[in-house]
Each structure stands twice: as C-alpha cells, then as structure tokens.
Amino acid sequence: MSEDTDAEDDPAEWWDEVYDSDDSVPWDTGEPQPAFVNLADEEDLSGRVLDIGCGTGTHACWAAERGHPAVGSDLSERAVERARETAADRGLDATFRVADALDLPDDFGPFDTVLDSGLFHAFETDQREEYADELAGVVSSGGQVWLVGFREGAPEDWGPNPFSRADVTGAFAGEEWSVREMRDVAFETREASVPGLLAVVESV
C-alpha cells in the first residue's frame, strides 16, 4: 500500500492496488473452497447465487457451472474486471458488479444463497453486524448464507481477523436470522491450509 493510500479512507483503492500488484494473491486459489463443495454435495446450492466479495469470481463461476444464475460482487473494480474475464474465457453465464458489501445497491437481490469466502473475516467486529444487516436486505426468505473464513488459531500475521462461533451468532443476531450450523473446516490458500470455520445462516 502506498504511503498516501489509507485502507480505511479508500479501501477500494487499496484492494485495487493489491490485485494490480500480484496476479496470485494468497487467497485466490482458482478453486472453490472444499468446505463449500462438500456442503453443496450434502444439500446442494439453491436458486440464485451471490458470490459476495468475489475477488476474481471463483465461486460465482463454480455456481454457474452447477447451473445456477450467479452474480459476483466486489469492492475492487480491478477484481471485478478479472472475474468478468475469467467467466468469459470459460463461457460461463455469470455477471459481476462493483459493490460495497457494507452498503449494497438498492437494486441488488434477491438471492437464495450467498457465498462468503473470506469476506466475513476481513471485517472488524463492529462491521460484522452491519454486514449481516445488509445481507438481510438481499437474501430471500428461507435463503441461506454460507460463510467460511479463518477461525481462531489461524496465523495472526496473515491479515484477516479470525472469528469464532460467538462472532457469527453475535453478527447474525437479528430476528431475521437463524444460525443453522457451524463446523470446523480447512480454509485453503495458495500458501497453506489454515484452520477455518464454516457457518450456515438461514433467513427466516
């Protein structure tokens, strides 16, 4: 990050710099998180899918390959450009938008399934409830949020904010949410397999 770029003042510019500086960012493995794949094998995805914080579009493309209408969103315009290129190269019907997960557009949604791979753990504690409130406006009744990220015990110097089960239940505490299940999983990066937590939250 350059000296005159502050992540808090202009996070979009910071993320653009990250994607411009390295084509192989650590979290971008090019493959869907195994935790999502295993969960989809158990109960399958449902309906229209949003890959929120999509980066280069891995999970939106994965959902599209499974036959679902898929949308990816990310704060970084550069990431969205790369996601569109990936989908076009693979001939997939997935669309992508630049959007702030803490201030989603009024015309966003509805979605039956939201996939969050590594976004929840990018937020500070006080942002997570705000994030859950934003998702409540775009998830259909009976829809689900699948989120996976670093859990407590992950390397402290890697950047994200590892979260616990209590962090999930605390963020999704509104009457519109029901935390259906949580399980310890691996969160895969280019560098290592990291202790992760998978949560399934249902809109009620």
Image (spheres, helix red, strand yellow):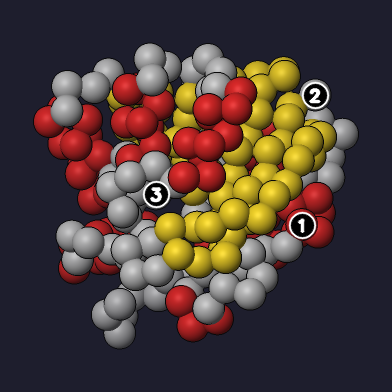
Report whether residue 202 is seen: yes
The spot of residue 172 in percent (x, y) is 77, 44
Residue that extends furthest to the right in the rendered view of this protein: 175
Tell me which numbered mark, 1 or 3, is placed earlier along the sequence.
3
Q: Give the number of the mark in front: 3 or 2.
A: 2
Residue 62 tag number: none
Q: Disc 2 marks which residue? A: 204
Amino acid type of the residue that numbered disc 3 sits on in the rendered structure: Leu
Q: Residue, x 53% and y 44% (percent of image)?
A: 35
Amino acid type of the residue that numbered disc 1 sits on in the rendered structure: Arg
Residue 165 tag number: 1
Q: Residue, x 76% and y 41% (percent of image)?
A: 181
Quadrant (top left/top right/bottom left/bottom right) for the N terminus: bottom left
The spot of residue 88 in percent (x, y) is 16, 27
Amino acid type of the residue that numbered disc 2 sits on in the rendered structure: Val
Q: Residue, x 16% and y 36% (percent of image)?
A: 85
Q: Does 34 sit left or right of 65 as displayed?
A: right
Which of the 4 image quarters holds residue 112? top right
